[in-house]
Image (cartoon, rainbow, N blue to C red):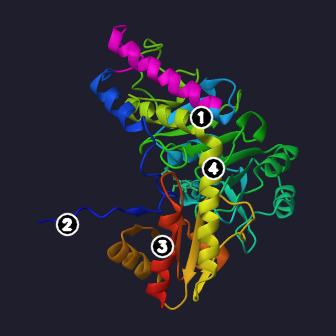
Amino acid sequence: MTDAPRRTVYLDHGASSWPKPPGVVEAVASAIAEYGANPGRGAYAMGLAASRLIFEARRDAAMLLGVRDSADLAFLSGCTEGCNLMLKGVLRPGDRVVVSSVEHNAITRPLHVLEQRGVRVDVVEADERGVVDAGRMEEAVDAAPTRAVVCQHASNVTGAIQPVADLADIAHSAGALMLVDGAQAAGHLPVDLGSLGADAWSASGHKGLLGPQGVGLLYLRPGLDVEELSQGGTGGSNSEEPGQPTARPERYEAGTPNTPGIAGLGAAVRYVSSHADELRSEERRLARRLHEGLLAIDGVRVLGPEPGEPRVPIVSAVTLGVAPDRVAFELDRRYGVAVRAGLHCSPATHRTLGTLETGALRFGVGFGDTDADIDLVLGALAEILA
Ligand code: PMP
């Protein structure tokens, strides 16, 4: 007799949400089974159906994110590609960029390349909770001519929500662009890109938007001229022209799109749109229950904002005396709990928080998690650390 498969208590939604809400798996499968033709190419029924599916996904994502013209949203492979595009598409040698000290490497690595090409990168330290201070940002921006301010919308380590609208005002007053990594905000926070002030905002489809991996969204403010990363592969429009189409979104969507991924994202976005309030209040409640439970365990220090302060549903902790990767291993092996340990692709954040040596244990709460899951994890942690 074999053991029944153990249910995974999944608390790694900060990396990828799982499971997916009703309709997402079916939408991916039917895009492959029923619409498996290239959109935007053939004028036959299957190609047109694929084009329609992409049009609807873009329209519904635009609606959720407060984007008036859905052509200002491009489907890319994920937030990383969008971050590369918005940075490399506007920054030129001699430009200065001011960036927070708590960015993911989807920002810091492209900036590292740009720095080697002659872009000046100045860093503004976030506070001990990982929150970016608008006053400090203003001082840095005003200190020298600045082409762009770059900041995350929310942190994948501390869950801290950054004052993006204030930072955008500061950037614009100085004639700079506001470029935002929205990976951890998308889906979890109400986002209105029409009024936020971001000139560019990049997000993953597979985190809080509850879509499949391999697809993300980049918003570019109307009229902003950003150079594309790739050219070609798009035969559907202006085939006779030697250059990449300049119209949006075609300019940024070279090659055959990820139609199954976009189909899944479309279904996910419709689910998030119709359940946003309950999804957000439930994940906030569970994250707070976890946060308060962690604070009650001896030998645990929680990073980031205090309980009750704004955060997305990510809670990271340092475990004194036992390395986080050991704790994560025990949680998985003995209790079937999936969490992430380490630096979470953001050594910059851990440097800011003083946790570069230890790293942390990260709990990402989300769709499908329950009170029983949170209580199981807290009990397991207390046993492991006892
Ligand atoms: N920025 C942040 C803040 C993230 O948390 C992540 C995902 N870990 C990314 C960027 C990269 O996103 P993607 O996996 O969609 O490329």
Quarter where residue 311 is shown? bottom right
Label 2 or label 3, whichever comes before in sequence order: 2
Circle 1: is it few (<14), some (14-19), or many (20+) Cα within 10 Å?
few
Question: Which mark lies nearer to you, 1 or 2?
Answer: 2
Q: Are marks 3 and 4 in contact (CB under 8 Å)?
A: no
Give the residue at mark 2. Answer: 3
Q: Taken as a whole, is the magenta stretch helix, strand or loop?
A: helix
Real-space Cα separation, disc 1 to disc 4, in angstroms: 12 Å
Label 1 or label 2, whichever comes before in sequence order: 2
Q: Which residues are magenta?
A: 38-63
Give the residue at mark 4. Answer: 280
Real-space Cα separation, disc 2 to disc 3, in angstroms: 22 Å
Residue 54: say if magenta: yes
| Residue for point 20% across, 66% down | 3
Label 3 or label 1, whichever comes before in sequence order: 1
Residue 313 screen position, x and y as percent: 60, 59
| Residue for point 40% across, 75% down | 331
Which amino acid type corresponds to the residue marked 2 in the rendered image?
Answer: Asp
Question: Which mark lies nearer to you, 2 or 3?
Answer: 2
- Ligand 1 within 8 A of label 1's CB? no
Give the residue at mark 1. Answer: 274
